[in-house]
Amino acid sequence: MPVTTRGTDTRRTILDVAQRIMAHKGYSAVGINEVLVEAGVPKGSFYHYFASKDAFGEALLKSYFDEYVADMDRTLAQQGKSAAERLTDYWQQWRETQSLDDCQGKCLAVKLGAEVADLSESMRLAMKDGTGAIVDRLERTIAEGLADGSVAVEGDPRGTAQALYDMWLGASVMAKIHRDLAPIDTAMTVTRQLLHI
């Protein structure tokens, strides 16, 4: 196997393992050594793949959001469904990936959002870019819904998309606090009301 492929695979393994561990414990509570041991990577090789823990955190968030928006794009591009149906599918998937104990890396924005915003400017910006990409896709699909008649909103698509994402992120945090999916279900009800679907 070429060295570049092996290096890429090792870097990917480190990020995947870190995402899983940090989704459970948070960012600050996880040491680099814990990630490397779990990934089966020699301790001294971390800085071969990442310049610092900050650079590692930024790479982790970028990787997470790249995967997240790719999955979101697949859901929102389904053929033969109205924009309202595609948006409903997205929110339903959100609900299904929320675990009240351990999200296994599927809800990293919920787990790390407030924590990393105060730790690192580069990580805050990676989080901002990633969440912005999500809102962009919601805005686009809401606009498609206005065009196909399956959605109606009181304000503009961007403001509605931002408000919906903010509400779902908050509902996910509240679901973890209460260990109950009721806040997510409430978010779904309000989403349907706001989009008139």
Image (tube, rainbow, N blue to C red):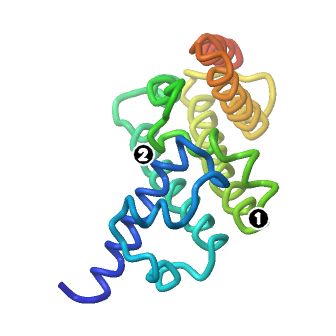
Q: Where residue 91 is drawn, which disc sits there? A: none
What separation in Å lies between label 2 and label 1 (alpha carbons)? 27 Å
Q: Nearer the viewer, residue 48 or 187?
A: 48
Q: Where residue 71 is drawn, which disc sits there? A: 2
Relative horizontal placement of residue 114, taking residue 111 as reference (left or right): right
Say what amino acid the circle numbered 1 marks: Ser
Where residue 2 sits, quadrant-wise, is: bottom left
Identify the residue under disc 1: 120
Q: Quadrant of the N terminus?
A: bottom left
Check the image and report above or below for 19 versus 87.
below
Q: Secondary structure at mark 1?
A: loop
Q: Nearer the viewer, residue 39 or 10?
A: 39
Say what amino acid the circle numbered 2 marks: Asp
The structure residue drawn at horizontal position 63% and vertical position 37%, both measured from the top left corner, is 143
The percent position of residue 100, horizontal first and vertical second, equals 54, 24
Q: Earlier in the sequence, mark 2 or mark 1?
A: 2
The structure residue drawn at horizontal position 42% and vertical position 41%, both measured from the top left corner, is 77
The percent position of residue 192, horizontal first and vertical second, equals 62, 15
Q: Secondary structure at mark 2?
A: helix
Where residue 180 sits, quadrant-wise, is: top right
Relative horizontal placement of residue 9, taking residue 11 as reference (left or right): left
The structure residue drawn at horizontal position 65% and vertical position 12%, both measured from the top left corner, is 186
Relative horizontal placement of residue 161, taking residue 11 as reference (left or right): right
Where residue 17 sits, quadrant-wise, is: bottom left
Binning the other alpha carbons within 10 Å of mark 1 as few (below 14), some (14 to 19) or many (20 upward) gives some
Q: Nearer the viewer, residue 8 or 29?
A: 29
Q: Nearer the viewer, residue 42 or 184?
A: 42
Q: Quadrant of the C terminus?
A: top right
The percent position of residue 42, horizontal first and vertical second, equals 38, 76
